Image (cartoon, rainbow, N blue to C red):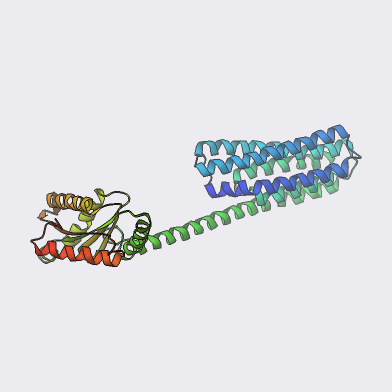
Amino acid sequence: MSNVPAKLLQNVAEQTPKAMVAMLIVSITYALVFNILIPFNILMTWFCLQILLAICRIYNAKMFEKHLEKEDRKRLANDEVIFIALNVFQAFMWTASSVMLIIYARQPFEFVGFILIIGIVTAATLSMSSFFKAYLVFFILMITPQIAIMLYFGEYQHFALLAFIVSYIPATILLSKSMLDSRISSIKAHEDVEKSAEEFRRLSIMDNLTNIYNRRYFFEMAKKIMAIASRQQTSVSLLMIDIDHFKKVNDNYGHQAGDFVLIHLARVVEASMRESDIFARIGGEEFAILLNNTSMNDAKRIAEKIRIIIESKDFLYNTILIDTSVSIGVAEMTQEITTIEALYKQADTHLYLAKGHGRNRVYPV
């Protein structure tokens, strides 16, 4: 399984095509500069392999993006192995470029190869540091042959370069690690901002106590749903639900008991709803359900079902059984009632009549 953060892999995938374009430009320059020194067939074989490598690397980057989108961690782990293998091959190819200079060119062209490798390793810090393990493999495989080449020639200037390599290695690794840490910090900061924004949005539309929608969001959504229903000539109904004698619950058992009833009643009602319904706490002990594509008769049947469920439900607070029932007013959007405000007023009137007729009932019957 892949253990590299997805956004770091995404960064690697995005940077790879750019890095491959840069690599091909350097490869073309190498071929043009040294074509008079290195046999043509050997140079062209090397260059064609570089092109093949670039194609494989870009394809590997596309696979990263595809499997990241699907969140396929198993295939991502395979992509990482392929990525490392391709970088091993890339290091081999650039080492081969140095060896060709040693074989076919005179001194001091080994220094040209050395400078070329150092430049490539440094540039790779930008494109590969997000995948630190792969970069370390690439770095070691690129630098180690250069150390061997400098030792092979063994002159003072070669030992001088070795001294600089000794300081270059930790400095470059630290730079790469620093860039990785910076990217991880940036990702975490971005995720924290996203979480904060999502939490802010959730708080702006949800009732803190019952964790259902609040009044403001309910009216916003109701306006949109009713506008669509009006255009499509479909039905919309509204249930206004009020807990009977809720003040007595607070007075007799305390506000914590009242909160308990509100929370559990919301859960019970929510469990019996459809996904298309909008359920919200309007205020205090009053709730509303907007029933999309639902006629008056169907709405009354749904309201009666909810009433029976609440009446039969045991609201056990600590050791206290709190008898709970609800009164429900039902209203339907008509040619005269076209706004949520008018629909709400009609349902509220019917709720008042339900309570006036003895509570624990649906009105109209």
x, y (%) of residue 8?
Answer: 56, 49
Rendered residue at 31%/59% (across/down) = 213
The image position of residue 57, as x and y in percent, is 67, 40
The residue lying toward the viewer, choosing from 291 and 214, is 291
Q: Position of residue 81 (x, y in %)?
A: 59, 36
The answer to whether residue 3 is visible is no
**Tag count in the figure?**
0
Residue at the farthest left position:
358
Q: Is residue 95 above or below residue 295?
A: above
Task: Pick whichever, 48 or 159, lies toward us.
Answer: 48
- Tell me: 160 left or right of 68: right
> In what quadrant of the picture does the C terminus appear?
bottom left
Taking the spot 12% from the left edge, 49% from the top edge, the residue there is: 312
Q: Is residue 125 left or right of residue 306?
A: right
**In the rendered image of this protein, does residue 130 appear above or below residue 194?**
above
Residue 289 vs residue 121, the one in the foreground: 289
Q: What residue is at 74 percent from the left and 45 percent from the top? A: 23
Left or right for 324, reference 268: left
Identify the image quadrant of residue 41: top right
x, y percent for residue 103: 87, 35
Question: From where the camera sits, is residue 133 visible?
Answer: yes
247 left or right of 6?
Answer: left
168 and 163: which one is in front?
168
